[in-house]
Image (tube, helix red, strand yellow):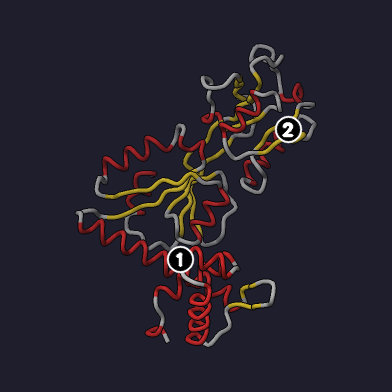
Amino acid sequence: MTNQLEIRHFQYFLALAETLHYRKAAERLFISQSALSQQIARLETILGQTLFIRTNRKVNLSRAGELFQKEAALIINQLQHSMERWQLGIKGGEGILRIGFVGSAMQVYLPPIIKKFSAAYPLIKFYLHDLSNKDQLAALEKRQLDIGFMRAKNLPRTMESISVFKENFSLVLPAKHPITSENFKDMSQLAEESYILFPNERSQMYYQQIINLCGDYGFSPQLSHQSIHGPTIFKLVESGLGISIVPNSLRDEYNYNIRFIELTNIPQQTELFAVWNKVSGNTALPYFLEVLS
């Protein structure tokens, strides 16, 4: 069976599995719909399984198709990684590392780590990807990332993690807000404010810490807006649409008309974790973990 499979079969299958639409998948692949239909039918014949359930109105993956999608993605990713290693080897390189991170990690913690790693292993090439916690985990599971830096600790059993950085939270207020660092006492002064926070589904641990922080002072924050991007949060605060609580390292006191108050006398701190697959075929990863330790 395997000697009948071609790389294009996996590519065609994945395009259709992602779009669940023959025309859109064919356009992405730059082939005709009939050609795509023929190749999918050929793949199903080779495998002896129905991969898609077709009706007049829509296309869905069968159970066999859902299982095959995971394996096909791994095969295509492995092929891509192998070709990149081969090309790098020709140029005298020794590896490639894909690093994911949440935006705040790049403000203080990650740049010196990257600099130290580059100095120690100049022949290992790396790519940086700014992603949410949720997107990093998805990319790690698909082997599209080798390591991620995120504010999440509830991980699949396939993942390993270590805590690499702890820091305080900071309040983010409009510049003309009546609360200042001089008259700020505790969070109860801000119980009636509207809050702009990171979405719960993108960073559950971080979000829960904010809820607990407010709960310690007898209130639940009233959400007005949500965003995963620091600049968006700061612009919304500047516009008077609410206040926020962010990692202290995300502070930007020069580009926005806002003020920050570091929260130092509370038990909550935000924590950054390095996360990677327990079983990784990337020979460059152990070198990077050495630098972290």
Q: Quadrant of the N terminus?
A: bottom left
**82 relative to 59, above or below:** above
Task: Say whether disc 1 or disc 2 marks the residue closer to the N-terminus.
Answer: 1
Which residue is disc 1 drawn over? 30
Q: Name the residue type under label 1.
A: Phe
**170 relative to 289, above or below:** above
Residue visible at 57% across and 79% down in the picture: 51
- Residue 66 percent coordinates (x, y): 58, 73
**242 relative to 202, above or below:** above
Residue visible at 44% across and 35% down in the picture: 109
Q: Name the residue type under label 2.
A: Cys
Which residue is disc 2 drawn over? 214
Left or right, residue 154 beside residue 99:
right
Left or right, residue 171 beside residue 25:
right
C-alpha distance separating marks 1 and 2: 53 Å
- Residue 6 percent coordinates (x, y): 39, 78
- Residue 210 percent coordinates (x, y): 68, 36
Residue visible at 56% across and 48% down in the picture: 133
In what element is the residue under mark 1? loop
1 and 2 marks in contact (CB < 8 Å): no
Q: Residues within 10 Å of mark 2 (few under 14, many from 20)?
A: some
Among the 4 quarters of the image, the one containing residue 231 = top right
Left or right, residue 85 beside residue 14:
left
In front: mark 1 or mark 2?
1
In what element is the residue under mark 2? helix
* Disc assigned to residue 232: none
**Foreground residue among 20 and 161:** 20
- Residue 12 percent coordinates (x, y): 48, 71
Residue visible at 79% across and 32% down in the picture: 219
Q: Residues within 10 Å of mark 1 (few under 14, many from 20)?
A: few
